[in-house]
Image: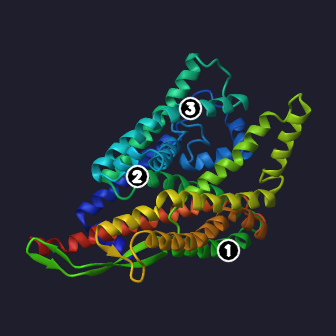
Amino acid sequence: MFESLATAFRAPDIRRKVLFTLFILLIFRVLTNVPVPNVNQAQLQNLFESNQLLGLIDLFSGGGLATASIIGMGVNPYINASIIMQLMQGVIPSLGELAREGEYGRNKINQYTRLLTVPLAFAQGFGFSVILSNAGVIPAAPFFSFETLSLLLSFTAGTILLMWLGELISERGLGNGISFIIFAGIVGRIPDQASGIVTGPDGLTRIIPFIILAVLIIAGVVFINEGQRRIPVQYASRVRGRRMYQGQTQYLPLKVTMAGVIPIIFAISLLLFPAQIATYFANSSIDWVRGVATFISTNLSPQTNPWAYSAFYFALVVFFTYFYTAFQFRPDQTADYLRKNGGFIPGIRPGKPTEEFLGRITNRITLGGALFLGVLAVLPTIVSTAIPGTEALQLGGTSILIVVTVVVETMKQLEAQMVMRHYEGFMR
């Protein structure tokens, strides 16, 4: 792999893309350390130690939220807008038809996603400012005051700036820009987290088994993430003009993890949101409201009841894996596409039987992917229990999946560009 990287770096156009990507990531890391005014850093640290929902949002902001920087919202509003647009394609027929119109349709949907990002960033920035104000991180101020509006505009502008930087990486750099920004934030926090373990009295004793376990988990993530079921598809002979094209056999690849990291994001958001709301009513004067809030805070908190929390978390990840896969892959549309193009699965009649066959295969392979994502999601609890003292270095399933996916996709893009350069001489 390192030899391939060195060979690719010697190519002028690829080297230019790599350097441009590194330059944008450097700008991102600088912006991460530019805080908004009037921030109490001590109160901010205490807030993040007691709030795991903010920790998840900070993961997708690249670490900017934990420092209350101007890019504190990160690309999280853009990710939410992308998820909403993907779900709406399965609900609104016009959006679904637009998505199937090739590059023009994708560009229009990307434009709608950018427009939706702005109000989502403003709303999320308002929610974050309220949390900071209640925790004493920033001074309390009325909504229409200059301080509050400037804070909201700073967070919204920071999100738009990161979205623009990510698109610059996608257009002129290497890989997917939004994924690279999240990747840089995750990797950038590892040294700070690891230093607290290594500098301890028995740091090496704890970190060595942790590294071995991490390597095994990364290998499993690569194996499952790249795993697919290849269904053979036979195309009949076709006549075009005066020429007859013989039938050919192709394959329909069905990935084990079609939903990617989305089920983990949905599950953790749904699981932590009620616990966060319950903390606001823990001191209510109404007995039954206070009792419900206390019950939710106790049973859905990873600090007070980690195993019940992990069980709910696992079940939600499995559910959302099936839910999101149903939006990503439609057996009826695939069967109709094969029928219209003269393709069929050997041994399966076209039409409804093909749709039922694809549905059964999808449900089977999704089960393996859902169980794998569920185990990956509850991995921090398992690791911290099996290896005491590693709570500071959270081996989160979301982090591992994002890092591995970005690295694998980037290597694939590098390989594709090297193949294009290799065959360039034959096309001249």
Observer able to see residue 28 = yes
Classify mark 3: residues with Cα within 10 Å, few (<14), some (14-19) or many (20+).
some
The local secondary structure at tag 3 comes to helix
Q: Which mark is residue 59?
A: none
**Which residue is drawn at the image coordinates 75% and 44% (left, top)?**
275
* Among numbered discs 3 and 1, the one appearing first in the sequence: 3
Identify the image quadrant of residue 216: bottom right
Mark 1 Cα-neighbour bin, 10 Å: few <14, some 14–19, many ≥20:
few
Q: What number of labels is visible? A: 3
- Residue ID for mark 1: 208
Q: Secondary structure at mark 2?
A: helix
The residue that appears at 25% across and 67% down in the rendered structure is 11
Query: Horizontal placement of 417 versus 202: left or right?
Result: left
**Position in image of residue 317 (x %, y %):** 64, 60
- Vertical side of 107 occupied by 210: above or below: below
Closer to the camera in the image, 178 or 263: 263
Element carrying mark 1: helix
Q: Nearer the viewer, residue 222 or 395?
A: 222
* Disc 2: which residue: 177
User: Identity of the amino acid at label 1?
Assistant: Ile
Amino acid beneath label 3? Ala
Q: CA distance from mark 3 to mark 1?
A: 43 Å
**Residue under label 3:** 123
